[in-house]
Amino acid sequence: MANFLLDHINAFLRMNTVVIIPAFNEQESIAKVVGDIPKNLVLEIIVVDNNSNDRTSDVAKKAGATVLFENRKGYGAACLKGIEYLKNTLPDTVVFLDGDYSDYPEELKSLIEPIAERDYDFVLGSRVIGKREKGALPVQSMIGSFIAGSLIKLFWNFRYTDLGPFRAIKYSKLLELEMQDKWFGWTVEMQIKAAKKNFRIIEIPVSYRKRIGKSKVTGTVKGTVMASVIIMKTIFAELFKSK
């Protein structure tokens, strides 16, 4: 009886969930990411190649993913490309995660269950409250998440502990957010807009490990500074919007 119920739940989740993975030069890791996603829980895995100059797209396709191409550079641009594609799919739930294998794709079920079973709108996987490999989450990322979370709490009365990429959201609610950021402000834009619209939000702990390859953001001083500026700009741009 227990196995029957488990199979029924898994089948329900699978029918309604798609995964979007923005990827830039992740040929060494993307097959591991795609391979570790529980196939019994997802309808489709979409890798958006963000103008890579390596074999990311070929490796992802061989691993079983649907591959899209976005030539405009930017994390948000790649995510927006994936969302545009979903107009032909119309899922109930969308999961986002990175292509560098720092997240644990097998934890996907933990992210989608609060939506499917408890009617949450947005589930954020927090690396800060989860189990982290030593050195996996740079100090500057933790400080940035703390500052951003504190400002969001101050302005919109919801406390986030992280700006982590591993997240799940109802497709209808994702469309309601009218996402626009094409760069590193993507994650915080989603979190702010979800708070402003009083979505049912929950954070859950997720595991985190050292990524394969060098980070395009925290791996360089330039990337860290640029991401920080964009995140702060996004926060204050949202603050002074009329709605």
Image (tube, rainbow, N blue to C red):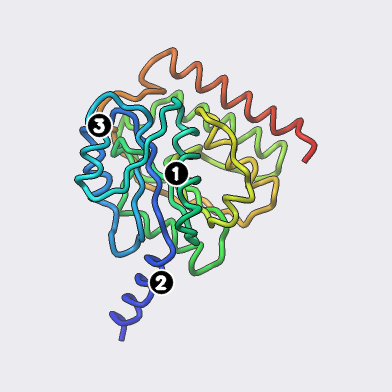
Characterize the local packing of mark 3: few (<14), some (14-19) or many (20 or more) Cα atoms within 10 angstroms: some
Q: Is residue 35 left or right of residue 52?
A: left
> In front of the other: label 2 or label 1?
1
Q: Which mark is residue 82?
A: 1
Q: CA distance from mark 3 to mark 1?
A: 23 Å
Would you name the residue on which mark 3 appears? 212
Q: Which mark is residue 107?
A: none
| Amino acid on which the number 2 mark rests in the picture | Phe
Ranked by sequence position, the earlier of labels 2 and 1 is 2
* Residue drawn at point x = 63 percent, y = 29 percent: 234
* Residue drawn at point x = 50 percent, y = 17 percent: 226
Q: CA distance from mark 3 to mark 2?
A: 33 Å
Image spot of residue 81 (x, y percent) = 46, 40
* Residue drawn at point x = 28 percent, y = 48 percent: 65
| Amino acid on which the number 1 mark rests in the picture | Gly
Q: Is residue 105 above or below residue 140?
A: below
Tell which of 152 and 229 is nearer to you. Answer: 229
Would you name the residue on which mark 2 appears? 12
Characterize the local packing of mark 2: few (<14), some (14-19) or many (20 or more) Cα atoms within 10 angstroms: some
Q: Secondary structure at mark 3?
A: loop
Quarter in which the C terminus is drawn? top right
Characterize the local packing of mark 1: few (<14), some (14-19) or many (20 or more) Cα atoms within 10 angstroms: many
| Residue at far top of view | 222
Q: Is residue 185 left or right of residue 33?
A: right
| Residue at far bottom of view | 1
Q: CA distance from mark 2 to mark 1?
A: 22 Å
